[in-house]
Image: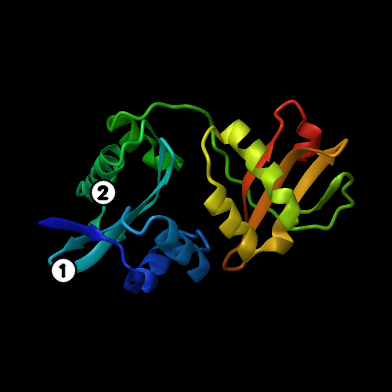
């Protein structure tokens, strides 16, 4: 019978093995961030004591987010992914969140729809080679810029996530940039070092300014 327990710091190697098995390029820094901000909200699935799957939840005020759902290939098609999802959904509901969101890869969409999730918008994933460009009206984020970052982030994300923004900025300040117009922030972007890549996000911009998003 499959059982669940809270993911612990000692699960680092298992989590990273699964995450990189599916090509996410995650690092120890990513795992540390999960443990820091969701110490009781990420779960390991066990089959007779063997670790076979994982799921991560994060709470932003009244918004709950589910991610990093992975099951070992030899244990798939047995309902373990569904069970992990239900376990994480119960945790979020018991924690008082009002809305649960997630990103979905194409092959997982039927599962999430069966669990009651509805399509909200396309969340595209892109890969490309980094090239250096001349960009106007942007500068590296500094400590004094962070209050403005919090404001524009809350304006569009609709919930406070200052601690995670602070942590992301502290880990890779050289990858955190903001765009300004008349001394007003109109967008920001943060990056995280991965295994052989840099992952972009969070990334917030005035939707009426696609030129700034670019």
| Quarter holding residue 3 | bottom left
- Residue shown at 28%/37% (left/top)? 93
- Give the numbered dot on residue 49: 1
- Residue shown at 75%/58% (left/top)? 130
- Give the numbered dot on residue 84: 2
Residue 27 visible in the current orientation = no
Answer above or below: position of 152 versus 120.
below
Q: Is residue 160 left or right of residue 78?
A: right
10 Å crowding of disc 1: few (<14), some (14-19), many (20+)? few
10 Å crowding of disc 2: few (<14), some (14-19), many (20+)? many
- Residue shown at 51%/36% (left/top)? 159
Give whichever of 14, 158 is nearer the camera.
Answer: 158
Residue 28 visible in the current orientation = yes
Quadrant for the C terminus in the image: top right
Locate residue 147, reporting x and y percent: 68, 45
Give whichever of 16, 89 is nearer the camera.
Answer: 89
| Quarter holding residue 2 | bottom left
- Residue shown at 70%/62% (left/top)? 173
Locate residue 46, reporting x and y percent: 19, 62
């Amino acid at each position: 019978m499959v059982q669940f327990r809270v993911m612990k710091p000692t699960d680092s190697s298992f989590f990273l093995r699964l995450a990189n098995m599916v090509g996410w390029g995650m690092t120890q820094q990513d795992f540390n961030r999960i443990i820091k901000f969701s110490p009781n909200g990420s779960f390991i699935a066990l089959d007779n004591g063997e670790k076979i799957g994982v799921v991560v939840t994060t709470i932003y005020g009244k918004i709950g987010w589910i991610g990093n759902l992975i099951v070992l290939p030899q244990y798939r098609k047995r309902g373990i992914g569904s069970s992990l999802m239900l376990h994480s959904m119960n945790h979020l509901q018991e924690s008082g969140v009002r809305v649960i969101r997630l990103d979905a890869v194409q092959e997982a969409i039927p599962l999430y729809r069966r669990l009651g999730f509805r399509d909200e918008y396309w969340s595209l994933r892109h890969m490309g080679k980094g090239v250096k460009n001349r960009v106007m009206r942007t500068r590296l984020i500094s400590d004094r810029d962070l209050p403005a970052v919090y404001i524009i982030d809350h304006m569009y994300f609709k919930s406070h996530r200052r601690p995670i923004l602070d942590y992301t900025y502290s880990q890779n300040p050289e990858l955190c940039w903001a765009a300004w117009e008349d001394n007003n922030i109109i967008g920001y972007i943060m990056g995280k070092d991965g295994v052989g890549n840099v992952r972009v996000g969070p990334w917030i911009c005035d939707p009426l300014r696609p030129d700034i998003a670019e």
